[in-house]
Image (cartoon, rainbow, N blue to C red):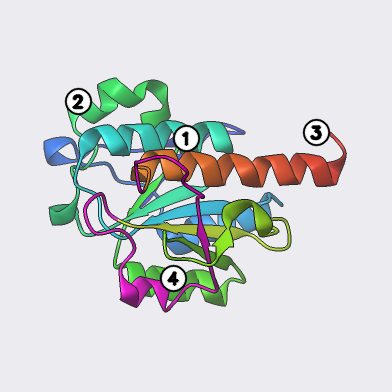
Amino acid sequence: MTVRRGAGGPPQRRHGPKGRTTGPTLATRIEEMRAAGRESAFLALDELHYGQNLAALLQIAAAGGVGGIVLPPARSHPGVTPTVRRLAGAAADLTPLHRQGLMASLAQFRRAGYLIVGAWEGAERDYHELDYTIAPVVFALGGEDKGLTKSVRSRCEELVRLPMRGAVPSLNVAATAAVLVFERLRQLREKAGTA
C-alpha cells in the first residue's frame, strides 16, 4: 500500500472496491512520525464490528494527533464504507488505517520503542496514573463484545482501566479511546507548560 503526501498536508489515499481505503504501510507511517519529530500515538484494535465506532475512532484520532489506527483483517471490521465516511466527515481522510495482524503490529511497535498500553476493565491501575509522556504510545483496545483478549493483554507493557462508578461496567471502544487519547494530550500539554 502506498500514499502520497503533499507538503504539510494530510495523506492522499486511494480508495479501492467496496469502500476500502489504502494508505501507508505501518512501518512507513512509524518512520514518518519519527522523522517529523512528533510525540506519536497509535490505536490498535483487537476487534471492530460496527461502522459507527470506526467513524468515531477516526474523528478522535484526527482531533487527538493519533498517527494511525491498526485494524484487524478486513473480514473482521466494516472498513471505510460510505456510511462510515459520512459519519466521520473529513476525519475519514486524515488518519491512515493499517490492516494487518495485531500481534505482528504490536511486535513492530515494540521494536520501534513504543509503550504498549492496553485498556482492560480488570487492570489494577487507573488510566490517569500512567505517564504517557515517557515514550510514544500505542493504545490497544478490545472489541465491542469481548473486550481486550488475553493474548493481546499479555503483549501489553501496561494495562489500565477506566474507573466506573455507575451501573454500566464499561464504555464502548470509541469512548474509551477518547478518554485515553485526550488524557495523553493533557499530560503532554502540562509537561510543555501549555496546559
Q: Is residue 108 above or below residue 79?
A: below
N-terminal of the two: label 3 or label 4?
A: 4
Few, some or many C-alpha atoms within 10 Å of disc 3 (few <14, some 14-19, many ≥20)?
few
Q: Mark 2 points at which residue?
A: 83
**Mark pair 2, 1: CA separation:** 17 Å
Given this view, does label 1 or label 3 mark the residue nearer the observer?
3
Magenta part of the chain = 143-169
Q: Is mark 1 on a helix, strand or loop?
A: helix
Residue 60 shows which numbered tag?
A: 1
N-terminal of the two: label 1 or label 4?
A: 1
Q: Mark 4 points at which residue?
A: 106
Few, some or many C-alpha atoms within 10 Å of disc 4 (few <14, some 14-19, many ≥20)?
many
Q: Mark 3 points at which residue?
A: 195
N-terminal of the two: label 2 or label 1?
A: 1
Few, some or many C-alpha atoms within 10 Å of disc 1 (few <14, some 14-19, many ≥20)?
many
Q: Is residue 100 above or below residue 150?
A: above
* In magenta segment, residue 82: no
Asked if the residue at tag 4 contacts the one at tag 2, i.e. Cβ–Cβ closer than 8 Å, the answer is no
Residue nearest the observer in this picture, 95 or 28: 95
Q: Is the magenta stretch mostly helix, strand or loop?
A: loop
**Mark pair 1, 4: CA separation:** 21 Å
Instruction: Describe residue 40's horizontal placement relative to residue 142 as left or right.
Output: right
Where residue 151 sits, quadrant-wise, is bottom left
Tag 3: residue type?
A: Ala
**Mark pair 1, 3: CA separation:** 20 Å
